[in-house]
Image (tube, helix red, strand yellow):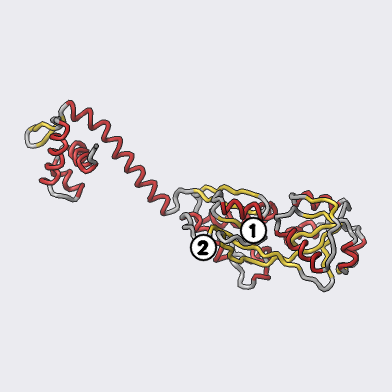
Amino acid sequence: MLNFNQLRAFYHVAKNMSFTSAARELFITQPAVTAQVKLFEDYYDLKLFKKKGRGVSLTEEGKLLYEHIRKIFEYEKEIENLIADMKSLKKGLLRLGTTKTYARWFMPFLVGKFLEKYPCIKIHLKEGSSLEMTQSLIELKIDMAIIAKVEEPPDVCFIPFSQEEMVVIAAPDHRFARKGVIPFDELAKEPLIVKENGSGTRKIVNELFARHNCPLNVLMEISNTEFIKQLVEKGEGISFLVKAGIAAEVERGKLAALVIEDERLFLDVSVACPKDMPLSPPARAFLEIVKKLMPEDPFQGIEMLMRNCPPA
């Protein structure tokens, strides 16, 4: 079996054609270098160096061996440089997960803040329901996620980020649009376009109807938030979405946002990561940025956070 201490001594001597220089680079004495090289030569019964004046030169066997050994230690240096780059976040990969709504609306802002500081880190962003992203964390397919806490498995850690108000949305010409505030009993009679089971939004809606001991009148179950908005705008039904996520459509008069009488609905948005698992350097850096952005008042909401966040 090759002895890497002997290989390293041979490499440094051959590179410098000097036992003295090799000893200086290896931070050991010259006799120690000489001993390592001799052990190597004796073990394989090879003569690798010959004297040349006051210095040394390689034998033909030494030249052939050096060409191969040189590649080992050059590659070792590349590995050392790569490790240093990863530790200093000059290289690396960050695997994030989020819902489709936040992928379109909030994650570009958050990822942008991260890349302002760490432009060399590659980002892989996976989208799905909050439940799907929780499962991806359990399976270690992603490092971290910005999601609602639909369930709380023991091997996932949830760090509260914000409380996002949810509202009822309807077409601008819907009879509810003129009221602004609607009793639950009237709402319950309307056909609903809802998010799929596993989403944080659907969990809140299910809990609302359960509190009133009322079944959901589900017309359609859709995972795509943009499709829900389009259907509601056309008057196909009403739905529930995060208020900040439909602000632009309300401002343009394409949707109406309504609240339920005597009800306030809030979605718990959290930063989720595997519990009792060390985070990668990019994930640790991302979490630090997220923590600095966390609003003091969680009910302030993400939209206000984005408006108030100073540019880099």
Q: Name the residue under label 1.
A: 147
Q: Where is residue 203 in the image (x, y as percent from the top left)?
A: 73, 60
Q: Position of residue 131 (x, y in %)?
A: 66, 55
Please give the label number shown on residue 288: 2
153 sits left or right of 279 in the view: right
Quadrant where the N terminus sits is: top left
Q: Position of residue 288 (x, y in %)?
A: 51, 62
**Which image quadrant for residue 78?**
top left
Q: Which of marks 2 and 1 is nearer the N terminus?
A: 1
Report helix, strand or loop for mark 2. Answer: helix
Residue 292 in view: yes
Mark 1 surroundings: few (<14), some (14-19) or many (≥20) residues within 10 A: many
Report helix, strand or loop for mark 1. Answer: strand
Residue located 13% across and 49% down the image: 29
Residue located 10% across and 46% down the image: 31
267 sits left or right of 49 in the view: right
106 sits left or right of 201 in the view: left
Front one among 195 and 311: 195
Front one among 154 and 272: 154
Residue located 60% across and 60% down the image: 153
Q: Position of residue 151 (x, y in %)?
A: 65, 61
Please give the label number shown on residue 189: none
In the rendered image, the vertical position of residue 212 relative to residue 117, given as above or below: below
**Amino acid at circle 1:** Ile
